[in-house]
Image (spheres, rainbow, N blue to C red):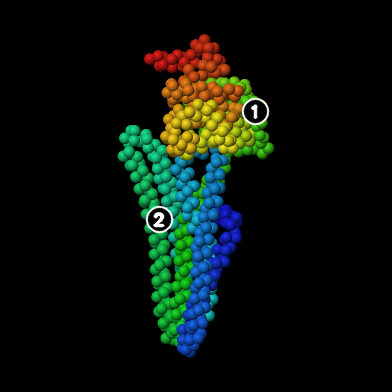
Amino acid sequence: MLSKFISYYKPHKKLFFIDMFFALLISVFDLIFPMVSRNIVNVIIPEGRMDLLIKWTIIMFVLFLLRYISYYIVAYWGHVLGVYIEHDMRKDLFSHLQTLPFSYYDNTKTGHIMSRLVNDLRDITELAHHGPEDLFISTVMLLGSFILLIRIEWRLTLIIFSFIPIMIWFAISKRKKMENSFREVRKKIANVNAQLENSISGIRVAQSFTNEDHEIEKFAEGNHQFKIARKYSFKVMAEFIAGIGLMTNILNLLVISAGGYFIYKNYIDTGDLVAYMLYVNFFMQPIRRLSDFMQQYQDGMTGFERFMEVMEIQPDIVDKEGAIDLENVKGNIKFEDVSFSYTNGEDRVLSNLNLDIEQGKTVAIVGPSGAGKTTLCHLIPRFYNIDEGRILIDGKNINDIKLQSLRGNIGLVQQDVFLFTGTIMDNISYGDPDKSEEEIIDAAKRARIHDFILTLPNGYDTYIGEKGVKLSGGQKQRISIARLFLKDPPILILDEATSALDNETEILIQSSLEELSKGRTTLIIAHRLSTIKNADEILVLTNEGIVEKGSHEELLEKDSLYAKLYKSQFKDLIS
């Protein structure tokens, strides 16, 4: 996993080495200052060399300016490096999410996905910047301090550096607790995000049922669990930071006491003790950096682990080697002994289904709820892989066709229309972003939504709110139909596209759908049987498979399941 993390530095290696170079300069400047101070106290001041004092003062001032420039570069461009890496990871994760099948989204909460995409990667900026830099500077400072200090007084230096193993032991002992606590925080905030996304999306339902207090209670529980997890993580972090602080103070006390003793014994002089005091402060910088790094590492790598968990999920619906494009599509669709289940062969939704749909025909599929009507239509564009059998389009197995080519030739209109946050123009053009504005307007006219759009203050540039909340159900449906007119696919699937609409709107949209269906192979899943009387063929699908098929008149004459369903709806309309 660490090698994968390091691989994200490769596109930005120039910036990385710039950051490391100036970090090295900062370390060198910090190592020089105590030695110059020692020389001033021990030699220059006792000898009264004011010329050298002025000279070294000017030199150190220049070095401080150079350190300022170096620190600015490290602080700015180092963080930019982290931002670039975070950007690349988020881009890769989002691109990977686009390849995952419907089954992943069926089983994963939207809030959890958002948490991994946003929150989990946020701290990676700090880790990507400070991680290598802190390790590098700490190594240079510790080694440099040790070499310079041991030249002054090796016994005092060994006493000081004997504390390093103790500090390392302490850091390692706390590492596991910090890792577990930060991982738990990630899980809890993901739950909060999921609850938040769910509550906000359903705000209208909550208010219509006056369940605001219930939603507050649900959110409060998740928020409370996050608070507890966060509180514990800070407790572990406080133990770590406070422990490092205690060791720092003990080390300072040790330098003063032992240094005073060594002055008494004439092992060192006052200038040497000043240098030791300065070096101890500089020496504690890498210790503090290492303690900060431990926190950043646990926080950042916990998020990176969750990032990799998603990246390692292999999409089960992919183009096979040698997959072909679907060209000159006529629209013949054939199911051969197709079986499918959502649970790897258990509780089959479809079993040994055989179906042959001729090009250009309109075929309606009706039947009781749960019989697999929508599932059947979702198998054609390979939203799910079938367990057994084959599905053919123009004689070609859909498993042998490139997914983009397959889905590019299929248009889908569903009952629950999804519109993207943005303008009407944005949503219609989604059918084919390369089409011109004139073609978009023509598609809107054919969907019978153009006149309505012109009544809006900003016309096609009118903002429709999140998920099209400012539009009625019929208006959203007609925009989705305009989107399909623009796409112009040879195969069309209408999944209960009008069942949630009032009669007047349904009649209007039905005429748009009939125009859209002309010359295309069309599958209609219908709840209102009155809308499919003109279909070329009607299939009655139950848990036992296709039990009836024929035209509307033929099925009424059989006086079987379809006739009963139709008469039942007719009674409801009469009453």
**What residue is at 66 percent from the left and 36 percent from the top?**
323
Q: Amino acid at mark 2?
A: Ser
Q: Residue at x 47, y 89 (%)?
A: 48
Query: How packed is label 1: few (under 14 Cα within 10 Å), some, or many (20 or more)?
Result: some
Left or right of 413? Residue 472 is left
Q: Residue at x 46, y 63 (%)?
A: 291
Out of 43 and 463, give the one closest to the viewer. 463
Q: Is label 1 in a helix, a strand or a loop?
A: loop
Q: Residues within 10 Å of mark 2 (few under 14, many from 20)?
A: many
x and y percent of residue 401 in the render? Answer: 64, 33
Q: Which residue is mark 2?
A: 233
Residue extending farthest to the bottom is: 47
Q: Residue at x 53, y 80 (%)?
A: 151
Disc 1 marks which residue?
329
- Front tag of 2 and 1: 1
Residue 546 visible in this rendered orientation of the protein:
no
- Residue 187 percent coordinates (x, y): 44, 48
Label 2: element kind = helix
Which kind of residue does numbered mark 1 sit on? Val
- Lower sequence index among marks 2 and 1: 2
563, 76: nearer the viewer? 76
Residue 84, can we see it? yes
Q: Is residue 260 above or below residue 406?
A: below
Q: Count numbered badges in the picture.
A: 2
The one of 534 and 345 positioned closer to us in this rendering: 534
Residue at the right extreme, as displayed: 322
